[in-house]
Amino acid sequence: MLQAVANAFKLPDLRRKILFTLGILVVFRFLAHVPIPGVNAEALRQLFQSNQFLGLLDMFSGGAMSDFSIMAMGVYPLITANIVFQLLQPVIPQLEQLAKEGEAGRNRLNQYQHLLAVPLAALQGYAQCVVLQRSGVLTDFGFSRGAILPTLATLVTLTAGTMIAVWLGELIDQDGIGNGISLIIFGGIVADIPSRVGQLLVTSPLSLVMFLLVTAITVVGIVYVQEGQRRIPVQYAKRVRGTRIYGGQSTHIPLQVNSAGMIPLIFAVSFMLLPGVISSYFLYSKTKFVADIATAVYGLFDSSSLPYWIIYFLLVVGFTYFYTDIVFRQQNLAENLQRQGGFIPGIRPGRNTEDFLNRVVRRITLVGALFLGAVAILPFLSQQVTKTSTMLVTSTGLLIVVGVVLDSMKQLEAQLLMRHYEGFIKR
């Protein structure tokens, strides 16, 4: 691996791509430390320690939200827009048609996602500011006479920060190595690791050793499952045109064990936090019946309780099946195979092929769903073993980090092999 890295730096164009990517990440980290005025730093720290959902948003912002900087929302609004369009494609025929129009259609969908990200960023920025204002973090926010201009300035700054982060990610896509948006998130997650290592080293060295061991085992499991796939053999019929014969070759369809990525974790966390947030408003209701129900719901969805993690696990498994089914149906593999003259040996083209592929996907998704469920409850299991709530990297963050590293290595691998150098992956 070290030799492969050395070979990459020997090539001027690859060296420029790698250094450009690192430079963009450095620029993002500098911007992530430019604060927005009027923030109570101590109240902000206490709020993030007690709110899991804000911690998830902080991860997507690359750690900028915990400082409430101009990059506080990171690229999360664009990710939300992307998820919305993926869910709407089966519902809106025009969007589904655009997705089938090749690169031009994908570019048009990408433009729509960027346009949707702007109002989503403004809306999310307002919601976050309201939460922070109610928690005593923001001292000058609202639509009173003296706070209108600071409020508008804050919302415009947060929205602009999101689009700058998206722009930096797209610069990496164009002139760097790896997926730009993922690398922006990756940089923020990795940046917090040294401080957490120091904290664990001071408070509990044994916990640090345990976390390193758990992290190493989890990384191996993530790599194994993320790279796992079921290869479906495909045969293309021979076609004779004049004196030439086309087709006849054999290939395969790689069906991923975990094709949903981390999206089910995001869905499940959002769903789990909603009842607790709603019930918190009725805890001190004057009606005893309402207060008792709110207390019971709040206790059930408390992240320190065992029922919370059991429900969380089941939701992750359910959302994995849900999201995988939506994404797989959008690919129309059976229809595309039939159009291109391909078929699965022993399976009739058309409806039979579609049913066969759906059965295979559902079976292998079980492994991916159980794996994501285990990753989701990893913080709870680690806390029971180490007796500390501090983790080097959250389970969702670890999934992102490993996925980004694998994707970047594959891209660099392809670049090296194109230039006849030996890559990272030994064959």
Image: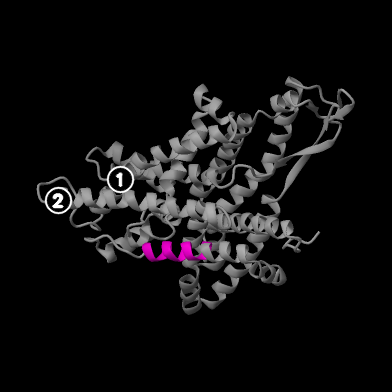
Residue 241 placement (x, y as % from top left) = 85, 23
Amino acid on which disc 1 is placed: Ala
Measured as percent of width and height from the top left, residue 5 is found at 67, 69
**Mark 2 residue crowding within 10 angstroms, few (<14) / some (14–19) / many (20+):** some
- Tag 2–tag 1 contact (CB < 8 Å): no
Q: What secondary structure prevails in the magenta region?
A: helix
Residue 359 drawn at (x, y percent): 72, 31
The label shown at residue 147 is: 2
**Residue beneath disc 1:** 127
In space, the residues marked 2 and 1 are separated at their CA atoms by 16 Å
Q: Is residue 389 visible?
A: no
Residue at the (85%, 35%) spot, across then down: 249
Where are the magenta residues, as a range?
Answer: 21-31
For the residue labelled by badge 2, is the local secondary structure a helix, a strand or a loop?
Answer: loop
- Residue 287 visible here: yes
* Residue 340, disc: none
Element type at mark 1:
helix
Looking at the image, tell me whether mark 2 or mark 1 is earlier in sequence order. 1
Which of the two discs, 2 and 1, sits closer to the camera?
A: 2
The image quadrant that residue 233 belongs to is top right
Residue 54 percent location from the top left of the image: 39, 53
